[in-house]
Image: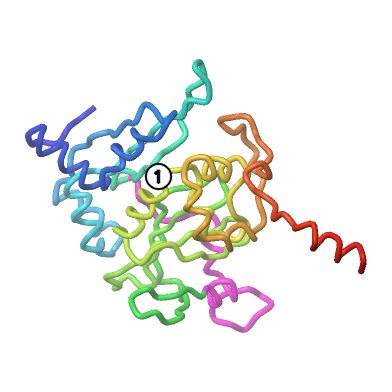
């Protein structure tokens, strides 16, 4: 496992700052174990320049500085379900720079004009509204044949996390979630830095990006949220109104009924009598 060409103390401090002290937080949570961070060599400036030339875009400044410090990021941890059952669950991963490539799957469908409409772009793209956090205004995503869409990660064949340049000249691409079945776009973050911080805030819990999708979290992942970070759901109750998807894969633990995590409001005896009388 390669390390950066700097002293160990400086190296450790760099990764602690980069991860906002996440390792210390996780190590204080019962049953979380094997907290691991892979240390990587930084990209050379020539590698960054070559990537930009190949794709005819400029990396945003924060993302460029990230890759000039470390060529990607791989952080993971395990959960101990029983004394003899420890399974890897949490994962924050940013690929090597060379692995960030243009989205190829269904790209023609995304950008091709529908034969049943006279719009210059498909309605699903034109109506992808989101709130611009810098201005507080409602904005919408405008894609065309010149737009650049780069894949940062894939989520269980349900969605892709994408770095989206509406035009190649854009200096501030945004992070969106592309739902692969419906080709719907969901806004995630204004910048690469914000997306990294969101990953850390969600502890690298599996499929956390689906909190912002129309399908919502799979049941077994929501149970992990309720066990380890229920506050992430309590502050976003509207997420629970979304349809829960079923992913064709084995979850890393036995499935529990999520109803056990919820409580019902108790009615007073007087209220019950009034209901019976009515």
Task: Quarter of the image for the C terminus: give it.
Answer: bottom right
Examine the image and state in which quarter residue 6 appears.
Answer: top left
Please give the range of residues in magenta.
Answer: 99-128
User: Is residue 273 left or right of 224 when viewed as pictured?
Assistant: right
Kindly identify the residue that appears in the image at 40 percent across and 62 percent down. 175
Magenta portion: prevailing SS class: loop
Q: Residue furthest top?
A: 84
User: Is residue 41 left or right of 125 when viewed as pictured?
Assistant: left
Nearer to the camera, 216 or 153: 216
Q: Residue furthest left?
A: 7
Residue matched to label 1: 203
- Residue 154 lies, in percent from the top left, at 48, 47
Task: Quarter of the image for the N terminus: give it.
Answer: top left
User: Is residue 94 left or right of 115 when viewed as pictured?
Assistant: left
Q: Is residue 117 magenta?
A: yes
On screen, residue 116 above or below 234: below
Kindly identify the residue that appears in the image at 59 percent across and 76 percent down. 123
Q: Is residue 127 magenta?
A: yes
- Residue 191 lies, in percent from the top left, at 32, 63
Nearer to the camera, 217 or 236: 236
């Amino acid at each position: 496992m390669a390390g950066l060409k700097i002293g160990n103390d400086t190296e450790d401090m760099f990764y602690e700052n980069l991860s906002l002290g996440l390792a210390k937080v996780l190590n204080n949570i019962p049953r979380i174990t094997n907290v691991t961070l892979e240390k990587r060599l930084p990209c050379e400036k020539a590698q960054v320049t070559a990537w930009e030339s190949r794709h005819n875009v400029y990396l945003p400044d924060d993302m460029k500085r990230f890759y000039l410090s470390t060529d990607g990021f791989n952080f993971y941890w395990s959960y101990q379900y029983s004394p003899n059952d420890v399974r890897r669950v949490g994962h924050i991963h940013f690929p090597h720079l060379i692995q960030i490539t243009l989205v190829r799957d269904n790209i023609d469908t995304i950008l091709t004009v529908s034969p049943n409409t006279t719009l210059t772009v498909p309605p699903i793209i034109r109506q992808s509204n989101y709130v611009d956090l810098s201005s507080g205004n409602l904005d919408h995503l405008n894609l065309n044949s010149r737009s650049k869409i780069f894949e940062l990660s894939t989520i269980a064949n349900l969605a892709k996390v994408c770095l989206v340049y509406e035009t190649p000249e854009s200096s501030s691409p945004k992070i969106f979630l592309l739902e692969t079945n419906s080709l719907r776009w969901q806004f995630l973050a204004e910048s690469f830095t914000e997306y990294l911080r969101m990953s850390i805030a969600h502890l690298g819990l599996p499929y956390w990006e689906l909190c912002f999708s129309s399908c919502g979290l799979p049941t077994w992942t929501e149970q992990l949220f309720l066990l380890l970070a229920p506050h992430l759901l309590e502050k976003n109750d509207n997420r629970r109104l979304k349809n829960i998807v079923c992913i064709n894969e084995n979850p890393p633990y036995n499935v529990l009924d999520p109803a056990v995590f919820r409580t019902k409001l108790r009615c007073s005896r007087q209220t019950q009598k009034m209901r019976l009388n009515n």
